[in-house]
Image (cartoon, helix red, strand yellow):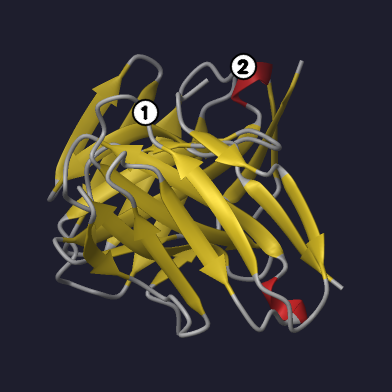
């Protein structure tokens, strides 16, 4: 079993929809949780960073971490065609960093 | 543009060969990270260097090695190449020495092993 599981999608939604992206993990020692966005033929770029449990909001993006369930989520409100990309969760601690395989999101006009 | 540069953009080689990938970090960043991205394995952390010293190691094969030079650029050496080494190789940099801070990724080098 992988330490981090992420549904590969693709997830196809209409413009304006609320998108929910999720990852589960098995290592209870993970303390740092991140979401990266990767456009086609580009390197990943950091979207959200959270330490331990809780919520964090940045514009249309909200990251949630539930350490008791070992589950993290990224919500995108009012999704736009420009949000079409692959979203990678990443998590770890001081000496380990694991990425999910990514969920491909398509937002159609 | 993240400010991280990688050369070459594409590399095609044969099994058993050795290649070197090069990365220049953002100005002022002391850490360089190397990643391998393949369709079946996703993004895998390979190794991190901080100011010339190895800082953290991930799933790096013994056939692979890296170093960071005094001018902070880094090279990833891949030897005895196998078909399964075909992948995108990313370099990232950051100002911090930790694994979990914001990393800025380069555009990647696509390696094809025939």
Which residue is rendered at x = 13% and y = 61% of the image? A94
The residue nearer to you, when weighing A36 against B57, is B57
Report the residue that reaches farthest toward the right: B114
Whether B84 is drawn above or below B13: the answer is below
| Mark 2, secondary structure of its residue | loop
Q: CA distance from mark 2 to mark 1?
A: 30 Å
The C terminus of chain B: image quadrant: bottom right
Which residue is rendered at x = 17% and y = 72% of the image? A28
Asked whether residue A55 appears in the rendered view, the answer is yes
Chain of the residue under the numbered disc 1 shown in the image: B
Asked whether residue A98 appears in the rendered view, the answer is no
Q: Position of residue A48 (x, y in %)?
A: 32, 33
Answer yes or no: are tags 2 and 1 on the same subunit. no
Q: Which numbered marker is on residue A41?
A: none
| Mark 1, secondary structure of its residue | loop
Disc 1 target residue:
B26
Chain of the residue under the numbered disc 2 shown in the image: A
The residue nearer to you, when weighing B113 against A1, is B113
Q: Residues within 10 Å of mark 1 (few under 14, many from 20)?
A: many
Numbered disc total:
2
In terms of image quadrants, where is residue B14? bottom right
Q: Position of residue B66 (x, y in %)?
A: 41, 64
Q: Residues within 10 Å of mark 2 (few under 14, many from 20)?
A: some
Disc 2 target residue:
A80
Whether B78 is drawn above or below A74: the answer is below
Q: Position of residue B81 (x, y in %)?
A: 69, 79
Q: Position of residue B68 (x, y in %)?
A: 33, 53
């Amino acid at each position: 079993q992988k330490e981090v599981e992420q549904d590969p999608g693709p997830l196809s939604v209409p413009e304006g929809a609320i998108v929910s992206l999720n990852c589960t993990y098995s290592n209870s020692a993970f303390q740092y949780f991140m979401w990266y966005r990767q456009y086609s033929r580009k390197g990943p770029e950091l979207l959200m960073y959270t330490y331990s449990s809780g919520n964090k909001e940045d514009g249309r993006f909200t990251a949630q971490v539930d350490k008791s369930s070992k589950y993290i989520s990224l919500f995108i409100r009012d999704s736009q065609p420009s949000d079409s990309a692959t979203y990678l969760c990443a998590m770890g601690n001081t000496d380990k960093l694991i990425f999910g395989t990514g969920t491909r999101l398509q937002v159609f006009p | 543009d993240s400010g991280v540069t990688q050369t070459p953009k594409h590399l095609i080689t044969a099994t058993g060969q050795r290649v070197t990938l090069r990365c220049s970090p953002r100005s002022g960043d002391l850490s360089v990270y190397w990643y391998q991205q393949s369709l079946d394995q996703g993004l895998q952390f390979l190794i991190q260097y901080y100011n010339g010293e190895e800082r953290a190691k991930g799933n790096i094969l013994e056939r692979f090695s890296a170093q960071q030079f005094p001018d902070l650029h880094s090279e990833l050496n891949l030897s005895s190449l196998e078909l399964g080494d075909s992948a995108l190789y990313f370099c990232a940099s950051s100002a911090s020495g930790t694994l979990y801070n914001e990393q800025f990724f380069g555009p990647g080098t696509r390696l094809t092993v025939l």
